[in-house]
């Protein structure tokens, strides 16, 4: 079997309820249950990891974000509802991996350790021999996996993360099995670092992961942070300027923007303004979520 048919095979299995011959259903379900227990324990009872440590899962994050993290800035505390979102994201990813197994695809090397120049991590798995990260995503993020444009807009550093695993394994092909957690759609995005005919090849090979690691080890030890990761964007026709998506999810946006940053709560979520020409007629909160008095 091949990752080229992975999504269609999962859909077919769900639709027909026919499990391919040779699949040990009970074994897959039992492993899924054990992994769910581990996820719940890690998310509810385990302590937070050390943000100051460079690891494979964060080497692709923006330079300035890494600088704040490595240098001990506190950043925002995750709200309980955000922690729950992360929790069910992990549970969805475990479910998707179980579906890949139940559809007859060969899943190996789960949580195999990887290391490049002292930076360590654990890969998700290989599916049909292809190094694969399993992700759950919002519809906005899912679109980038669906159309292959992730390499052009990757604020969470997924590409460098998986390139690190690939380097450790001596692999040049890798991909992501992704579920849109809003509507259940699946997609598989594969990149090949050796295929020069692909439109993404130049950008994918612009620098090696070893060069990336050498670069971040240097910048995090500098006395001042590197330049801001993204420029603010216009907030419609209001004259205000707001943080884009890449900055909105950063835990260090208050350290980065200081008193210029103001948070306004709209029906569809918070909006972070860094230039306020016209004050929105909605509730404003401080960095701790407390209502700001007018």
Image (tube, grey):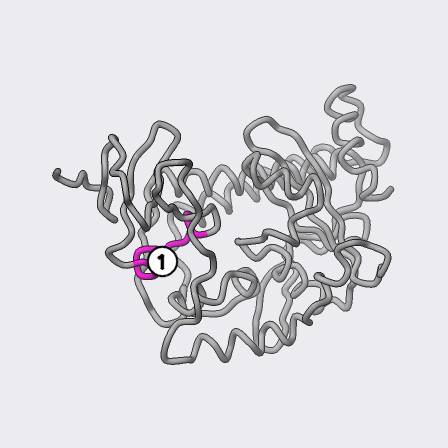
Q: Main secondary structure of the magenta part?
A: helix
Q: Residue at x 16, y 41 (%)?
A: 292
Q: Nearer the viewer, residue 126 or 41?
A: 126
Q: Is residue 250 magenta?
A: yes
Asked whether, in this view, residue 156 is left or right of residue 68, the answer is right
Q: Is residue 266 above or below residue 1?
A: above
* Residue receiving disc 1: 252
Badge 1 element = loop
Asked whether, in this view, residue 193 is left or right of residue 150, the answer is right
Residue 29 position, x and y percent, is 65, 35
Q: Which residue is outermost to the left? A: 293
Residue 140 image-quadrant placement: top right
Residue 73 position, x and y percent, is 32, 66
Highlighted magenta segment, given as a residue range: 247-257
Q: Is residue 51 magenta?
A: no
Image quarter in which the C terminus is found: top left
Q: Nearer the viewer, residue 261 or 187?
A: 261
Image quarter in which the N terminus is found: top right
Q: Residue at x 55, y 29 (%)?
A: 182
Residue 173 position, x and y percent, is 78, 58
Q: Residue at x 39, y 65 (%)?
A: 69
Residue 194 position, x and y percent, is 83, 63
Residue 212 image-quadrant placement: bottom right
Q: Residue at x 81, y 37 (%)?
A: 104
């Amino acid at each position: 079997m091949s990752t080229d048919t992975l999504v269609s095979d999962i859909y077919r299995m769900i639709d027909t309820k026919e499990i391919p011959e040779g699949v040990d259903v009970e074994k897959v379900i039992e492993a899924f249950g054990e992994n769910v227990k581990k996820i719940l324990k890690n998310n509810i009872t385990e302590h937070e990891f050390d943000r100051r440590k460079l690891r494979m899962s964060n080497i692709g994050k923006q330079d300035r974000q890494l600088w704040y993290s490595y240098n001990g800035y506190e950043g925002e505390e995750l709200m309980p509802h955000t922690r729950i979102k992360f929790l069910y994201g992990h549970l969805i990813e475990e479910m998707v991996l179980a579906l890949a197994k139940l559809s007859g695809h060969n899943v190996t090397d789960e949580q195999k350790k990887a290391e490049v120049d002292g930076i360590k991590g654990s890969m998700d798995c290989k599916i049909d021999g292809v190094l694969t990260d399993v992700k759950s995503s919002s519809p906005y993020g899912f679109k980038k996996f669906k159309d292959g444009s992730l390499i052009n807009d990757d604020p969470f550093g997924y590409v460098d993360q998986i390139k690190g695993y690939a380097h450790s394994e001596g692999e040049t092909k890798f991909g992501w099995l992704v579920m849109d957690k809003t509507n259940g759609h699946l997609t598989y995005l594969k990149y090949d670092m050796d295929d020069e005919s692909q439109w993404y090849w130049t950008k994918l090979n612009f620098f090696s992961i070893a060069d990336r690691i050498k670069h971040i080890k240097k910048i995090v030890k500098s006395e001042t942070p590197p330049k801001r990761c993204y420029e603010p964007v216009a907030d419609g026709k209001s004259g205000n300027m707001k943080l884009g998506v890449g900055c909105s999810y950063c835990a260090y946006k208050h350290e980065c923007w200081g008193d210029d940053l103001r948070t306004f709560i709209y029906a569809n979520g918070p909006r972070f303004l860094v230039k306020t020409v016209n004050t929105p007629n909605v509730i404003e909160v401080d960095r701790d979520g407390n209502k700001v008095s007018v």
